Image (cartoon, rainbow, N blue to C red):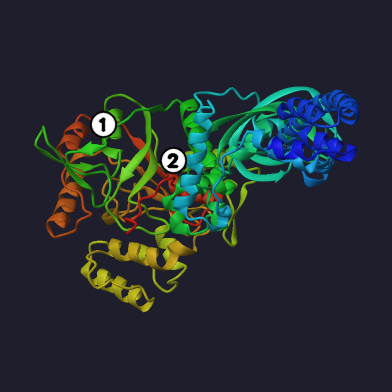
Amino acid sequence: MLAPLTSNLSKKGGIIMSLFLLSRNAAAFVPAARSIVRTSNARIAAPIAANYIFQSSKLFMSTAADTAEIEALIEAKGNEIRQLKADGVDKASLAPHVQELLALKAKLAPEEKAPAQKKAPQKPTKEKQPPKKNEADMSDSELRQARLAKVAAMREAGVEPYAYSYKPTHSSMELQDLYDGKLEGGEEDETADVAVAGRIMAKRVFGKLAFFTLQDESGTIQLHLEKNRLGDSFKNLKAWVDAGDILGIRGTVRRTDKGELSVYAKEWEMLTKSAAPLPDKWHGLTDISKRYRSRHLDLIVNPSVRDTFRKRAIITSTLRRELDALGFLEIETPVLHSQPGGAEAKPFETYHNSMDMNLTLRIATELHLKRLVIGGFEKVYELGRIFRNEGISTRHNPEFTSIELYQAYADYDDMMDLTEKLVVSMCDAVSDTRELPYGDDIVSVERPWRRVTMTDIVKEYIPDFDFESLDPNSPEDLEKAKAAATAAGVPKVDTLTSVGYVLNQCFEELCESNLIQPTFVIDYPVDVSPLAKPHRSKPGYTERFELFATGRELANSFSELTDSVDQRERFDAQAAKKEAGDEEACDVDEEFLSALEQGMPPTGGLGIGIDRLVMLLTNSPSIRDVIAFPLLKADL
């Protein structure tokens, strides 16, 4: 390449131009310049070449060093900008850094940029990714996969998404109470060191700032999270945390400018990464069937539901404490019975394989508790589950909770006094008033409660007819009772076989639903009370009461039958009904009769339906609202 060039140089200008062109290539410059001197006019070329060689070599070395330095600065500035973008810095804050990068690039001559670009490390070209989906547009499956991908990312980063333990110092309610009336807006308690744990119910993220709502059992509190305070972990917080996750947060306490008490986070920990979204994705959990079927979600998103079950727990614990204080003992009795007894109800049937026995689930605890009284325990009770194979309604569930108690040397008058005392105590434990709202009514549980005989309350609805004047054993009086009931609009009386059954049917059809205030309906016919002692002054009636409120039965009580011969006759009558096809009638329980023949002291017995009582005390319209996991049909 040099031969044609050097052979044509003869003038000063050509020599200088040739040397300039060659100086762009350091390796070729010096030998080419010497060749020019040898082949050109020595007087002209030698001094020019010598001086140009010296000056150009200095210039070339200096330029190469400057270029390398600029390229290094460009690369460093580029890396800095990329990191700022990853940290979420906004465009306005990035602008000065970008201008500085452009100025550095401008210092390089255009022909010098190309080699620098070749030397710079090349990043692998990323495939263009589709735009991220909004969570509201994602299916359940997509949401689950996205969250599980975060679980994998956390583990890859060495972070366990399912912690083993955490030690909160306060609940949200404790902090709210502790700082009530303290801290002005924008003020921080820098001396505080608190730790809270709970489920994230809502997220609001604003670049370097975020506010989360944390919910624990006691309530909610706001979390105040900042990048400047959390450092690099703030980036992970934004990337990994979703609503529904369970976090642990430690920090100080601050009240925001808007007055919201907040834990001002210094550190955070993922305690449980949720794989499924909260139901607020669908604007809350409002479908009644879904609420009962997914009670865990119902409890998460509906604070009033948690409050109902918290009150239920307080009600039952208060009941136990009251009875324990009165000297009662809680003794557990069997759930599996060889034959049903203690109530008129159709049982659930089962089978014991190894014992080759047909068994039923208990429909009452009565007979075993009475055997304990016979054995010498004067005050006993059991609070537990009862199982009856019956229909389902807003007031009936096949599996329900009741308490039965028995007190020796007491009668049904004592049981009425005890019932009032127990119910009022349970009310006071969960309510600051004894005037309770229930639906459209106000129910007062202030003592004393109304006491009325069944015959008197029926007479209020059939004023021209008096059941108490009838002979329970007279066929003529039975026909009179049926006629009066039919005239009053009471259905299905034609097949009834006694005056007592007609009276009870009239009460259930005409009176029961209208008993909104607590009312003891007393003195039931012997026909519908197989375990109650005969009334001491009214033939054909028993010393029995039922407590009604809000139009439904809440409690049932007897002066207990202690005559073993009378008891056998009543069992025989029940067995005859069962033989005739009545699935709810009980059979003769020989084991109980054998115990009763040993002698049972005069005893008052009481049974209270816990579920219905909780309905009243929590203003719940359905029994399913107060049973955590009610029996439901299969979700097909």
Q: Position of residue 344 (x, y in %)?
A: 26, 51
10 Å neighbourhood of mark 1: few (<14), some, or many (≥20)? many
Does 72 sit left or right of 598 as displayed?
A: right
Which mark's residue is nearer the viewer, 1 or 2? 1
Q: Secondary structure at mark 1?
A: helix
Please tell me which residue is depicted at 71% across the width and 27% down the height of the picture.
27
Tell me the residue that label 2 is attached to.
Answer: 415
Please tell me which residue is depicted at 30% across the width and 29% down the height of the picture.
373
Residue 107 visible, this angle: yes
Tell me the residue that label 1 is attached to.
Answer: 371
Q: Position of residue 520 (x, y in %)?
A: 46, 52
10 Å neighbourhood of mark 2: few (<14), some, or many (≥20)? many
Q: Secondary structure at mark 2?
A: helix
Q: Position of residue 560 (x, y in %)?
A: 32, 40
Q: Quadrant of residue 589?
A: top left
- Dot 1 or dot 2: first in sequence order is 1
Q: Is residue 387 above or below residue 579?
A: above
Q: Amino acid at mark 1?
A: Arg
Depth check: 16 or 460 in front? 16
